[in-house]
Amino acid sequence: MALPITKAYDRVKAIDWNPSYISTDEKYLEQSRFFVKDLKPLDPFKTFIREYFKMEQEKENRHYSVLEASSRLHQGHAEARWMEGMKFGLSNFAFVEYAAGRQMGRMARSVAPVELRQGYMMQMIDEMRHAQLEMNNLRHNMRTWHDPAGYDIALKGAGNNVGSGMFRAMMEDCTTCDPIETAISLQVFLETAYSNVFFVGLSSAAVAQGDHTMASTFLTIQSDEARHMANGWATLVTVLQDDRNVPLVQEVLDKWSWRAHVSFGLGNALFQDYFTKNRTESAKEASLRWVYDEFYGGFYQKLERYGIRPPPRLDEQMAEMDDLSHAAAVYIFGAWPFFYHRADPMTTADMEWFEKKYPGWYSRYGWFWEAYNKCKDPTDKTIILGQLGGLPNFCEVCQRPLIFPTPAAHSGRSFMHGGKAHIVCSPGCQDIYVKDPQHYQTDKGFYDLYHGKELSEVVDHMGYVRDDGETLIGQPELDGARMWTRADLRCCDFVVKRPPPPPFVDEPVVAAAPGGIR
Amino acid sequence: MSDAMNDVTRSIWKESHKVTAKLINGADAEAIVAVMTAANPDLVVKDFGSYLALENERELVFRLADIGEELGRKFEVPDFLTVLASYSGQVDVQDDAVSITEFASG
């Protein structure tokens, strides 16, 4: 008879060894600034390799049978708004997951306790699986969707797209920070706070749009994330055993509460509100339930016993939920030639739904949709981007465009640091920059590459043109009388111009965390 | 900067004893719900189409033998983790059960 799990787990842990052929310093290439020596970690899932692979095989069997059935039985068409939106949405997932795999390999190499290493190593394999699942979903959609253009360049698009910059910056930040900060940023914020609302919450929306393969991809991924969430909690409570770590943990929690909100939180809000046609719940409702009630109320608040305080911008984050998706939509729809999907503008029914879910929506965003709907036909030679005055500046920390919390009253700012002027989207990102400026030194940004170039040249250079070399992949509506071409863009006479910097502020605004309620 | 929390943060930063499990919808999830409903009279189950959400105060204990009996086949930890999409609370895998309990406080 097999040993009980708890006994077997202790036996397996006991065979961990220190190699004689390499010193400890050589083995652990990186040192964390956190105090981790002699701490006693947890591994609540107690997963063994043999059981792990058996479980993952079963998940794979269940998931790929869904893809096979979908291909074989032609299960009808999903909503076009969703399927087109997923050209952008799904393209971003694969590299995010792959980056998470890299991070876990680094964690397993950098963090000593065997219980944590075991969890990290299996998570590394999970993340590679997720990247493959998403690439297979891209391939499936490319084979089955009536307009595969966009799906065929998805990975390239995720690499050079101005909208994907937010997700690239988020993952690079996770990858290049302190190893313990990597665990907290990835496993606590991205995987516990936000991947739940994304992969589980949005799976309902995917089903409502008729995209069962995507729902299956989301859910089979999140069933692994359940272990990753436990890895995050285990890492947190392990390092919090040493009081010297409390201020270090607080600093990381303060940073990533804002950092995750402006990246993953923003993406989720956009996809939930603007890529769905058959409505389930609003992004604000989903976020309040999953992120603010379950995560901040049910998870983060429990850290108070260790002396952890709420993040300083929680109220600001909550307030932004009234506008986050709508401001993002102004950007992604307004800049449609820089994307690789057909946009589906909001209808009267959508606007009524928004007004119900976000009272006052029309007074804040109705102007944009009225203008947008007058600029869809290429024969009019008018592009919405020109009506908006061009693209905005981008934040040097999170890469968000400077249109938040609302395009009409954004919180973008310039400030001097190290003798140079810098641009950020918000006081929250300014705080992050000034605490660790070398982390956010930029290479060439969008305007360094394209300032002064005519729009059709830029779109061509980015590779967002169909096989005929002339028709754009991105379109401002699902089924226009004819599709926009590079020649149409030239007729609009639009040149990319770097906008003037936002107003300067004198002093950094470093927010302190509010006190606890005890 | 004041140490006092504003009303918005205070509204979130409150003691909660709720624990949840989200199960990928299907035959296994339905069997688990049947077992859990019988064992927990106050259990709240919400159907979100692609997943089922189970909510309870303080703890959810999934006894694998009971679920196996409901399904008519052996049901072990990896089988349970195959359909557990997410949870809130502190998870612990034991020899014959998986439990989700509220995080210990103060």
Image (cartoon, coloured by chain):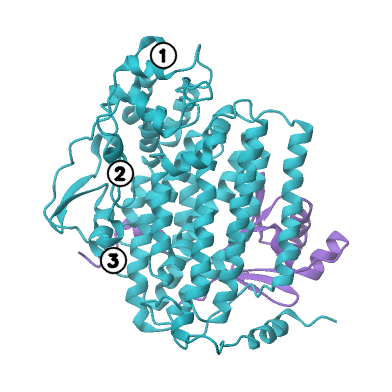
User: Image quadrant of residue A12?
Assistant: bottom right
Q: Which residue is mark 1?
A: A378
Task: Tell me the amino acid under the disc marked 1.
Answer: Pro
A170 or A5, which is in the foreground? A170
Q: Residues within 10 Å of mark 1 (few under 14, many from 20)?
A: many
Q: CA distance from mark 3 to mark 2?
A: 35 Å
- Quarter holding the C terminus of chain A? bottom left
The colour with which the image depicts chain B is purple
Task: Tell me the amino acid under the disc marked 2.
Answer: Gly
The colour with which the image depicts chain A is cyan
Q: Which residue is mark 2?
A: A445
Q: Position of residue B76 (x, y in %)?
A: 78, 68
**Which chain is disc 2 placed on?**
A
Q: Are marks 3 and 1 on the same chain?
A: yes
Residue furthest to the right: B72
Classify mark 3: helix, strand or loop: loop
Q: Residues within 10 Å of mark 3 (few under 14, many from 20)?
A: some
Residue furthest to the front: A21
Q: Position of residue A217 (x, y in %)?
A: 64, 47
Q: Which residue is mark 3?
A: A514
